[in-house]
């Protein structure tokens, strides 16, 4: 599979997508503001971390650490809805990208009663956020 360069995941949780990205990207950064999630994701990705392909940091999207390189891909799965000011945070993240870089937000509503309409509404909200912060 071809490399997608330098990637960052915000809110990686248990680190499943980090493990997938590690097989695709040259180098993977991740931040999560939960110390428990950083521990879980670190266990799951220990080999890639040892090899220097993955770096996980305990940090909030409100206070981004230094990444030391421009990024090709920034993604967040089921995380942006928890950010206090998502539009402002997306503007911060946009500055970390190479000119050709992309931001991807994914959302899967899991609240009681969630259905296709709930998912479509969440998708529209995320789409609107990205539309005012193209990337
Ligand atoms: C619902 S979980 C999703 C985890 C993972 N992305 C997944 O889909 O399995 C949301 C994650 O976002 C993280 N998170 C929420 N707000 C955050 C913030 N302001 N900065 C960094 N991480 C945050 C939480 O700690 C949690 O790990």
Image: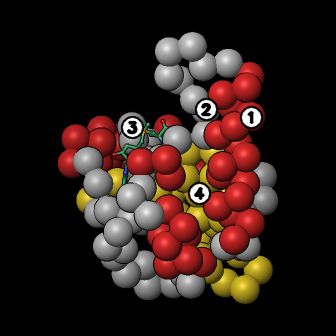
Question: Residue 97: in sight, yes or no?
Answer: yes
Mark 3, ligand 1, within 8 Å: the answer is: yes
- 88 sits to left or right of 45: right
Q: Which residue is mark 2?
A: 108
Q: Which residue is mark 3?
A: 14
Q: Earlier in the sequence, mark 3 or mark 4?
A: 3
Q: How many marks can you see?
A: 4
Q: Which mark is residue 75?
A: 4
Mark 2, ligand 1, within 8 Å: the answer is: yes
Q: Earlier in the sequence, mark 4 or mark 1?
A: 4
Query: Whole-Å distance between the Cαs marked 4 and 1?
Result: 19 Å
**In front: label 2 or label 3:** 2
Query: Whole-Å distance between the Cαs marked 2 and 3?
Result: 16 Å
Label 2 Cα neighbours within 10 Å, binned few <14 / some 14-19 / many ≥20: some
Q: Earlier in the sequence, mark 2 or mark 3?
A: 3
Q: Image quarter for residue 91?
A: bottom right
- 84 sits to left or right of 134: left
The quadrant of the image that shows the C terminus is bottom right
How far across and down, in percent of the image, does residue 4 sit?
A: 71, 64
């Amino acid at each position: 599979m071809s490399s997608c360069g330098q990637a960052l995941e915000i809110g990686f949780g248990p680190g499943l997508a980090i493990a997938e990205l590690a097989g695709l990207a040259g180098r993977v950064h991740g931040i999560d503001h939960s110390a428990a999630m950083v521990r879980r994701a670190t266990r799951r990705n220990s080999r890639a971390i040892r090899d220097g392909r993955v770096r996980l940091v305990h940090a909030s999207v409100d206070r981004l650490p230094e990444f030391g390189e421009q990024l090709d891909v920034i993604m967040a799965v089921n995380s942006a809805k928890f950010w206090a000011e998502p539009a402002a945070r997306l503007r911060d993240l946009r500055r970390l990208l190479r000119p050709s870089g992309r931001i991807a937000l994914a959302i899967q509503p899991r609240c009681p009663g969630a259905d296709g309409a709930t998912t479509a509404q969440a998708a529209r909200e995320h789409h609107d956020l990205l539309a005012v912060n193209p990337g």
